[in-house]
Every structure is written in C-alpha cells, then in structure tokens.
Image (cartoon, grey):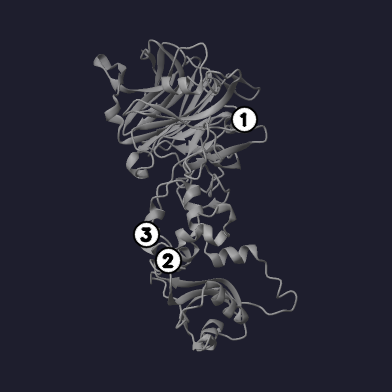
Amino acid sequence: MPDAAGLPDDALWRPWADLPLDLLRDISRRLHATTDYVRFHATCKPWRDTLPPAPCYPAFLPWLLAPPDSAKHRMARCVFSSSRSTRRGTSAATEISVRDRRWVISLVDGTAVSTLTSICSGSGPSGSGLTAGVDVADPLTGSASSASATPLPLPPFSCDDEIKWWVDHADAVVCGDGTIFLYLFGPVHRRSYYLPVFNAALLRPGDTAWTMVHKQYLGISSIGDDPCSCIAHHDGKIVARYRNWCSHYIETRQVDHGQWVTPLPSHYGKALQASYLLESRGELLLANVLANHAHSYTIASFVDGLSVSVHALQEAEGGKTQWVKRDGPSLADRVMFLGSPSSFAVDAARFGEISGGGCAYFVLKSELYGGIWSKLAVKRCRVFKYSFLDHRSELIEQLPAEWDNDACMWLTPPQPSIASTEEIREMIEPSHTKAAGGPQFGPYFRIYVGNLPRNVDSYRLGQFFIKYGKVAEARVMCHIKTKRSRGFGFVTLATVVDHEHEQEHAIAKLDGQILDGRPVRVKFADQKQPHVAC
C-alpha cells in the first residue's frame, strides 16, 4: 500500500468524498468534536456544496480554557478530537489563543451566555445591564452574535471604581434555575468604597433588584489558588467548600443571611487533589478527586490510584443539610466536566458513544515520573477521565508546558459556521480583474453536465470548462463499486458578466458544446439529487 505522504492531496480525502451523501450526513451528525466537524466538511466539499444547510448540528464537546495570562489572553484547546496522535499522553490537539472576555458560563451545558462587563457596566444593547440572550462574542472566534432581549437592572454598586473592581476580579455563572450569581473575594479598602472578605450579588428570575450579600468570614478567602476550594449557589443557598472539615452555607433568602456549617465527607487513606461543586438535575453535587498516598508517583501508578467521589447535598432532620454519597450506577447517564471556577454536567446521550457516559473529565497539575526507571519527574497539567461504572481512570492528554496552572475551565463552543466553496474562494481570492480593466466575473454557481464520454475524468471536465469561466470545482460521478464514470458530473464556476441574466445566458451557451465528439447537456444542478464522486 503506498505511503499516505506520497499521495496527492486529492487521493487523501477522496475515500471520504466518495461515500454516499446520506451516509456523509449521518457521519456529520455524529462528530461531537468541533475540529473533527470542521475538518470533515472541509474534506467532503462536493457533498457540502450539493446539499442545503443541515437542519441541525450535533452537540459539541467543550473546549478546555487555560487561565488568562498577563496579556488577558487564554489558550483554548480541543482535547477530544479524534485526530489526536497520542504517545505517553501527549497529542497534537487543536489549540488557539483567544482574548479573555470574562465570560459568564451557564452551569447547565457550559455555554457562554454573557460577559461580566455586560452585567456590571451595562454594556448590553440598551446600555442598561445584562440582557437575556445578550450580545456575546463567539468565545473561540471573537465574531459577534446579537439577539434582541429584555434588559435587566444593574447591581447596586456604589461608584464606578467599585464597578471596575467587580469586572476585573469577580466570577459569575448562570445557575440551573436561571439565577445570575456574581461573587468576589476581598477585603478591598478604597476611599470611595469598602468590600469585606466575601461579597456576592444574585439576581433570580423575575426579580427586579439584586440581592447583595457581604460577609466578613466564610471559611474561604479565595478559590483560584487552592484546587480544593470551590463555591456555588443552589436553592437559595451559597455553598462554599474549603480545605477543612466542613462546608459553609449562607441562606440568601433571609434578610440577615443566616450562616451555618455542615461536616464534609471523609476520605480515609486517600489524598485530596481537587474539589468541585456543580448542579445536575436539580441537585448540588460535590465531586472530590482523590489519589493514593505516595512519596512519588509514576504516571501509571498515579492514574491507577485516581478516583472521583460524588456526594449530593440533601436535607436532613431538623432542617439541616448533609452530604450523601452517590454510587456509580446513579451517574451512568451523565458526563461531568470539572473545572475552576465553574463545573457542569450534561446528559451522556448528547454525545452518543464518544464519551460513554458515567464519567468525569478534570485537569490536575502534578509531578510525575515517566516510568519506574525515570530519574526526572515532570510537573505538568494533565487531562484525566474517570469512569463511575468501572472505577478506572485514564490519562487523556498531557498539556503543553505553557499550561502551568490547573485552574482551567470548560466552555462549550457555539455552532460553527460552514461556508460553501464559493464563499471561501471569494474570501481568499481578491478580485483584481476589475481594477486591472480585465473581465469581471459574476458569482459562482453549480451546473449539471450530462452525456459525458466514459473516458472523461474530473480533471478533463475542469479543463474543458475553464475556457468558459473560472472553475472552482469539477467532479465526474462514478459507481461506488466499479469506480467507472456514470456519464455525468457537476461543475462550480463563475462566468464573465456580459449579460443581464449571465447565469441563464451561460447555461444556454454551454449546453450542446462538444467534448470528445459528444454534445454535453448542461443545466442548473439539482440540489437534492445524491451522487458519488470519482
């Protein structure tokens, strides 16, 4: 079999392009990694240009975002692409740099629903605060998407300096019940305002004013520096977990914002690596990542000793709360993405068989040896997966050295916009003909060419029509089994604008032209007719 490196580009993607159109459409619906989806559409150009836009997209797996750097940029990485080439946990996953826009993440599916600036400084369409479906830039591309919405009130900040402090230092999420939860750690002493150790602003669905919470002590001073610290809002309560024996609660529906503590579940014989709070199906879950105690680890021994325990917050007798352990089978139909400052869980059915269900993905920074004979330990951030069904962990990817902080978060990308070949060609090929005084070409259009001689292939077909205009693509359709020409094909071309109805005029001029002794039959392509390309 010839080496793929020695094959022309056309031969590399031809096996995919030759598949039946219905099968290609079905494959497209099963690609849950954004990079795989885009590569697939870039490869199968005849299928993409022949069919109308897909009525629905697959559910896309989230991207991993690193904490912002000093230049206010984040690295975004797709760790689920099937094109990854793994060896000892390393990979060639797609990675891009994006500007940090202080996104407000939905705890339902991890999508960016707004920005912190929109909430705090009233930069929505109406200039008066966050809006439901607010103008939000695409987190990965930066392109804007606007939607009409109803503006919401601003939190009662005392001055512009306080607004700026919240925008620069606060974190925000949208809870499962629609509550907008902003929180900020202090203390902050300024001439114009003062903020205590813990500060929060909540706006529940239907409320016309924000609920402000200020506490001098919450058992937690920050969550960015300690992977075992986390905070969430659920059922009217602010829940904070710190590296100690208890979790702290604030009842936000009471005027005095009462506060109490609840013991945390113990994990004897295990070393706590990280803790995460997340909502799932109306419950607040506490996920603890645990490892075996050891003086040093190899990658294999560390992975074998990793586990994730999950506890649900439930009401106990006397109005108190307690953490109740959840077993593996009860989590079999969901996938957890554990990150900082926010985590979320989604139904496993959204991603088909790619995730398997009943699992959790998380990032840990640890110093590990490559093997038992390794003399040098490598301290890196790594992505792991833990299965609640067979209680086994696996290393998904060792992140590059520049990912030196494990306070990463997951973000679900929006639906990608797939352009047609014609649109792409018009974007990358600037028109110089008009400025140079040459012929001016109209837009590209697709034609059906019939009555082709059996010896005419796609290259010959393109060369025949190139004298009548600019050919973007030419394809002769072949039988699936025999690979022999079926006597027709498709051509995408643009003709010189020399007539009021140039496309109809071009069809009339091209129909009946002689190719290898045969008059070809030309008409506009049938957008719904399935074919297989040679």
Q: Name which quarter of the figure residue 482 lies in.
A: bottom left
State the image coordinates of residue 426 (x, y, percent, origin top left): 61, 66
Relative to 433, is 243 on the left or the right?
left
Tell me which label, 3 or 2, sits earlier in the chain: 3
State the image coordinates of residue 261 (x, y, percent, origin top left): 38, 13
Mark 1 vs 3: CB contact within 8 A: no
Identity, as a three-letter code, of the amino acid under mark 1: Ala
Q: Which mark is residue 23?
A: 3
Residue shown at 53% from the left, 50% from the top: 125
- Residue 341 seen: no
**How many residues crowd around disc 2 within 10 Å: few (fewer than 14), some, or many (20 or more)?**
few
**Of circles 1 and 3, which is in front?**
3
Does residue 245 lie above or below 57 as drawn? Answer: above
Taking the view exactly as shown, the residue that stands out farthest to the front is 1
**How many residues crowd around disc 3 within 10 Å: few (fewer than 14), some, or many (20 or more)?**
few
Relative to 83, is 312 on the left or the right?
left
Relative to 383, is 350 on the left or the right?
left
Secondary structure found at label 3: helix
Please state which of residues 270 and 461 is positioned toward the viewer in this rendering.
461
Per the image, the residue denoted by label 1 is 401
Report how many numbered discs are placed on residues in the image.
3
Distance in Å between CA atoms under marks 1 and 3? 40 Å
Please state which of residues 263 and 218 is positioned toward the viewer in this rendering.
263
State the image coordinates of residue 300 (x, y, percent, origin top left): 47, 23
Distance in Å between CA atoms under marks 3 and 2? 15 Å
**Of circles 3 and 2, which is in front?**
3
Secondary structure found at label 1: loop
Per the image, the residue denoted by label 2 is 52
**Of circles 1 and 2, which is in front?**
1
Q: Name which quarter of the figure residue 526 lies in.
A: bottom left
Distance in Å between CA atoms under marks 1 and 2? 43 Å
Tell me which label, 1 or 2, sits earlier in the chain: 2
